Image (cartoon, grey):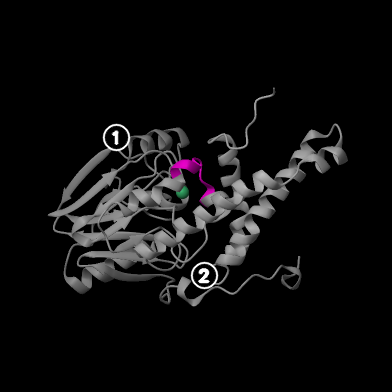
Amino acid sequence: MSANNLPDYAPVPRSALGPALNEQGYYVGRVERNLYWITDGTYQSAFLTTSDGVVLLDAPPTIGNNIQRAVDEIASANGVSNKVEYLIYSHHHADHVGASSVFNKNVTRIGHEETRRLLLRDDDPARPPNEETFQDRRTLEIGGERIDLAWHGPNHSPDNIIIHLPDHDTLVLIDIVNPGWAPIYTSNLSEDIPGYVEAPANALAYSWKHFIGGHNGRLGTRDDVTLHQQYMADIDENSRKAIDTVDPTPYFMKYGENYWAALKGYLDEVTRVAAAPVIAKYTGVIAAADVFTESTTFWVMESIRLDLGYGSQVHP
Ligand SMILES: [Zn+2]
C-alpha cells in the first residue's frame, strides 16, 4: 500500500482543531478556576487541583505519563499539590482509562457500579477496578469542590456517566459528541443507539458552558452539542426515508438462495441512500462527515429497524 493510492477526503475545517501541542506532545489549559484539561490532539482528560490533592477525570493511555507532567506543570505554577489522590472513570473503555495503573495503588478510584463489574470481568492490570461506586447519582465534595456523577442509562457503553462540575460551568460526557467532528464508526462504536441519541439532551438539561467530550483537540460548547443532535436527527430522518423507498426486489432476484448476499446488497444501498444527503449537508461543517457518516448511518438505520420496529411487517 502506497500513500498515493489512498482515498482523498474533504479538508478538516479549522474550527475542528484545538491548540498546538508542546514538545512532549500535549497541551494543558485552564477550563475555569482550578479545573484544567489535557489533550494530545485526539484524546482528552481533565483534572481539578484541590486542597485534598488532585482529582483526575479519566486517564487515556495515549496521553499516558504526560498526564502527570501536565499536573506537575500546573501545580508548580500555582503552588498547590501535584499528588493525584482521586481518579474518576467516565466508563470502562481502555482507550480512556488505560493509564490508570500509572497512578499510585492508593489513589481512590470512583465510577459507576457497572464500570467496576466490567473492569473485574476484563481483568486488565492497566485498569484497576474502581472501589468506589454508585448506581444513579452521587455527589462528591473533594477539597471543597463539588462533582456530580450521574448515570442516565446505557448509551455508548453500558456504564458511561455524566460528570457535572456545577461550580466550574463544565460538563464531561465522553464518547457521545466529538466537538467539531463526526462520530467515528457506528456512532462512536455505541452499544445502545437509543441511549446514544438521547444522551446529548440529558447533557443539555444541566447548566454548563464548557463541554469535555473526550475527543479530539478542543473543548466543546452547547452549540457543538446541538449541532451533533441535528446531525443525528438528519441521519434518523433520512434512514426512515431510505427504508421506505429502497426496493429490495432486485437484490433477491440477483442472488437467489444466497440470502445474505441479497441482504447485504439491499442494506448497503439503504445506508448509501440515507447517508448521501447528510454527507452533503455536513461536509465542511463537521470534520470527517465524509469519512464516517455511512458507518454511523448503518448502525442508526439498524437501530430504527430493530429497536424501534420501523418497517417491520408481520406476515399476513
Ligand atoms: Zn468508549
Identify the residue shown where x is 82% and y is 37%: 252
Identify the residue shown where x is 65% and y is 30%: 313
Relative to 266, say whether 78 is above or below: below
The spot of residue 10 in percent (x, y) is 62, 72
The spot of residue 66 in percent (x, y) is 38, 64
User: In the image, is 127 to the left or to the right of 134?
Assistant: right
**Sequence order check, earlier mark of 2 and 1:** 1
Identify the residue shown where x is 23% and y is 48%: 148
User: In the image, is 144 to the left or to the right of 314?
Assistant: left
In front: mark 2 or mark 1? 2
- Of residues 89 and 188, the one nearer the viewer is 188
Residue at the farthest front position:
316
The residue wearing badge 1 is 135
The spot of residue 109 in percent (x, y) is 29, 44
Q: Is mark 1 within 8 Å of ligand 1?
A: no
Identify the residue shown where x is 77% and y is 45%: 265
Q: Looking at the picture, which amino acid does disc 1 mark?
A: Gln
| Disc assigned to residue 10 | none
SS state under label 1: loop
The spot of residue 104 in percent (x, y) is 30, 50
Q: Is mark 2 within 8 Å of ligand 1?
A: no
Residue at the farthest top position:
316
The residue wearing badge 2 is 285
Residue 133 occupies which quadrant of the picture? top left
- 288 within the magenta span: no
Crowd class of label 1 (few under 14; some 14 to 19; many from 20; radius 10 Å): some
The stretch in magenta equals 188-195
Q: Quadrant of the N terminus?
A: bottom right
Crowd class of label 2 (few under 14; some 14 to 19; many from 20; radius 10 Å): some
